[in-house]
Structure formats: structure tokens, C-alpha cells
Image (spheres, coloured by chain):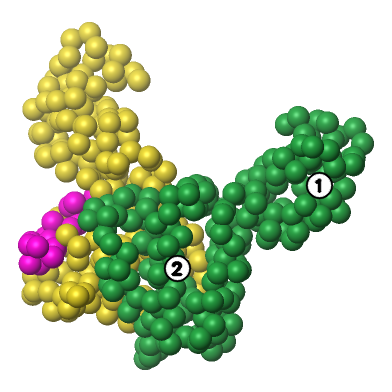
Chain colours: A yellow, B green
């Protein structure tokens, strides 16, 4: 990569017109090859040949950099907490509606499909999907559930939502791919609600 | 491929010791590149340099050849109908149990994971998964449901089952990946049962 070659000489330089672009390129390369946990602001800075402070200045936290590098146009940390602001009752429907509004929009969907495809073919146990994206989506949910049940309930919610991703968006199976959002909500929200606060199995 | 090169000269020859292997290689190549619908017994025979009758003789129908070529050690046409033999009541639990018994077994799981991974990264609308595998799994189910609801209900079942494939088997997300089968059944069977025979949304 040119950014790496250029930066190799010195390791830091002031922010130029294409500095943001070089940071994003270095970030994409690092996330792709080292996963989420293996990527550091320091490493991305070195890859782009800039000071780590400049990465923070332009992109904030590692989560922010992740969303920017993958060009994900929604910030789950901003929108997901609203789903649970009024508690877990009714959250199933609010979560499915939010989920559909994000995925039904082709602009938002495109980078997410790429992220999911990459993650599903990877054999690595730690994926960009799990550590990078799902963590941001699920943190506000997990805190709302009893601690000893939270992980199981959250996983079951993911099992239904990821199944929608596969069938409706990745495979585009009909008639689900063209089903009106309201009908999907009517079918799926009760499932998600039961996973959130239904009785535990014996 | 050597099989293609060898067969190109004449197009048919008697079954030799490695004829079955060459047919399987030709079938794998065709399924991978042409999908399920694009693959024909005649085309596979030509690829292996044998008479189409020999392919039928060794492998039966195209469905049989598909299962053999992908080394899928269960035949959904034999096991799935039992799930619905006693009707739709209780079929949710029987289906989830059968599904888990197949996927929890590493021997059965391996070729299925390969099939799902291949299908999910393909951009092609017609996948080996949908036309080849799901069709065989779903045919006995579809016939049990009211015709005008069958497709929707079946798709919703797939949305939950494919989500289990992604979370429990492909991504191996914990704690779902290690959850005892009985607990998965207790959580998921009611979902599948509601998709099968629950009330239609307004």
C-alpha cells in the first residue's frame, strides 16, 4: 500500500488533505486482516504514517473508526438505546421495526451485507461482526435484562434476526424478501419479545 | 480437469474402477459453477466422459447425485417427512429436534456448513442451498400447509432455522453454541410452531 510505504520513512506527519483517506485505508486493511480486537488506533496510525492523536482527532474511538472504515451509515450506539428506553415490554416490536428500517434501506444495507458475508466465510472465531458490530448493537439490550439470563436471551434474539438477514437480504428468498415490513413485524416481533422476557424453559 | 480432457475425445466409455469418482468430480464442478438448475445429468455425463445412463445407474436422480457430490450423509427426503407424518401439531418441536440432531453431529454438519458458506457468499439468486437442499427439506412441509399460506409460513420457519445455523454453527456464538439441545428446543420450537400454524397477522 502506498500509505504504508510513504509512512514507513518517518512514522508521523501532519494531517494533509488525504490524511483521513489514508487512515481509513489503513483501518480497513487492519480490520480485514487482524479482526476487531487485533486492530489498534496505534497500529492504524502507524499504517497510515500519522500520529495516533490524529486518528483520534479525526475519528474518535475505535468503534467510531470501525463504523467509518466500513462505511456503515448508522451508529447503533445512537439508535439502539431508544428501543429499550421505555423498558423491555414492547421492545421486540421496536427492535424489529428498527432492524427492518436499517436493512430495508439499500444504502444502509450494502455495507452491512458486505460485513456479514465477510464474517460468515471467515473461519476465525473472533469476527468483525461479533466483536465490532453486534457488541455495539447488543450492549444497550444486555444491560436491560437479568444478568444471569442476558446472554442466552440476547443470543436467541440474534438467532432470529440473523436468520432474517440470511433469508430476506442475503439469499433474497421469496416471498419473505418482498414481504411488507408490517407483516414481518407481525410475524417476528412476538418471537423476539418471547426471547427477551418470556418464561425460561424448565 | 483431467476427466474433461479424457472424455473430450469420445464422450462415452464403459464404467471403469474410477468412473464413479469421475462422475462425482464432474458433478461437483457443475454444481459449483452452474448451480443446481443449470446442472444436468447429461452435462455431468459429458464432463466425466460417460453415458448419461451410467450416471443414473450409479447415482439415480439429480437430487441423489447432488447429495452424493456434496457428501451430505443424510437424505432429507427420507427423514423430513417423518416430522410431518402425524400432522402439523407438534411438528415445530419434531422439526427442531431433527434439525439439531443433524447439525450437532460434526460429521453431518461439515458438508452442510460448506454448502451454506458457499451459498451465502454467492451473489447468484439461485443457489445450491435454495434449489438443491432447501427444496428437498421443505417439499414435505409445504404440502402440509394451506396452499395460500404455505410459502410465507415455510420462509418464516427457514428464517429461524437459518439463524440457528449462523449463530450456533457458523459463528459459534456463545452461549448458544454450547446450549444443550433440549434447551434450544424449548426456546425455539414454539417459534417454529407458531410460524407453522399460528394465526395469520391482520
Quarter location, residue A96: bottom left
Looking at the image, tell me whether mark 2 or mark 1 is earlier in sequence order.
1
Residue at figure coordinates x 70%, y 44% from the top left: B24
Q: Which residues, given as a range, are shown in magenta? A: A133-150
Residue A22: x and y in percent read 27, 27
Say if the magenta span includes residue A146: yes
Distance Cα–Cα, label 2 vs label 1: 34 Å
Query: In terms of image quadrants, where is residue A99?
Result: bottom left
Q: Is residue B46 left or right of residue B39?
A: right
Tell me where residue A151 appears, x and y as whole percent: 17, 59
Label 1 sits on residue: B45
Name the residue furthest right. B10
- Residue A187: image location, x then y, percent: 35, 80
Between marks 2 and 1 in the image, the one whose residue lies nearer the viewer: 2
| Callouts 2 and 1 on one subunit | yes
The location of residue A193, given as percent across then percent down, is 22, 76
- Left or right relative to B99: residue B60: right
| Residue at 87%, 48% in the rendered image | B51
| Mark 2 chain | B
Q: Secondary structure at mark 2?
A: helix
In the image, B53 versus A42, the foreground residue is B53
Query: Is most of the magenta stretch helix, strand or loop?
Result: helix
* Residue A89 counted in the magenta span: no
Disc marking residue B98: 2
Amino acid at each position: 500500500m502506498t500509505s504504508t510505504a510513504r509512512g514507513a520513512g518517518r512514522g508521523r506527519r501532519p494531517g494533509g488533505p488525504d490524511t483521513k483517506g489514508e487512515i481509513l485505508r489503513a483501518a480497513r486493511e487492519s480490520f480485514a486482516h487482524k479482526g476487531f480486537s487485533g486492530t489498534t488506533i496505534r497500529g492504524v496510525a502507524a499504517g497510515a504514517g500519522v500520529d495516533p492523536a490524529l486518528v483520534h482527532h479525526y475519528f474518535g474511538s475505535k468503534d467510531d473508526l470501525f463504523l467509518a472504515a466500513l462505511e456503515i451509515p448508522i451508529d447503533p450506539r445512537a439508535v439502539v438505546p431508544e428501543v429499550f428506553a421505555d423498558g423491555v415490554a414492547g421492545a421486540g416490536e421496536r427492535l424489529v421495526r428498527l432492524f427492518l428500517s436499517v436493512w430495508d434501506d439499500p444504502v444502509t444495507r450494502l455495507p452491512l451485507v458486505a460485513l456479514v458475508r465477510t464474517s460468515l466465510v471467515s473461519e476465525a472465531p473472533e469476527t468483525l461482526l461479533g466483536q465490532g458490530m453486534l457488541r455495539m448493537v447488543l450492549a444497550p439490550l444486555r444491560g436491560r435484562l437479568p444478568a444471569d439470563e442476558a446472554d442466552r436471551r440476547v443470543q436467541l434474539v440474534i438467532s432470529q434476526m440473523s436468520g432474517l438477514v440470511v433469508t430476506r437480504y442475503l439469499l433474497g428468498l421469496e416471498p419473505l424478501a418482498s414481504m411488507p415490513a408490517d407483516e414481518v413485524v407481525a410475524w417476528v416481533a412476538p418471537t423476539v419479545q418471547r426471547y427477551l422476557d418470556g418464561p425460561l424453559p424448565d
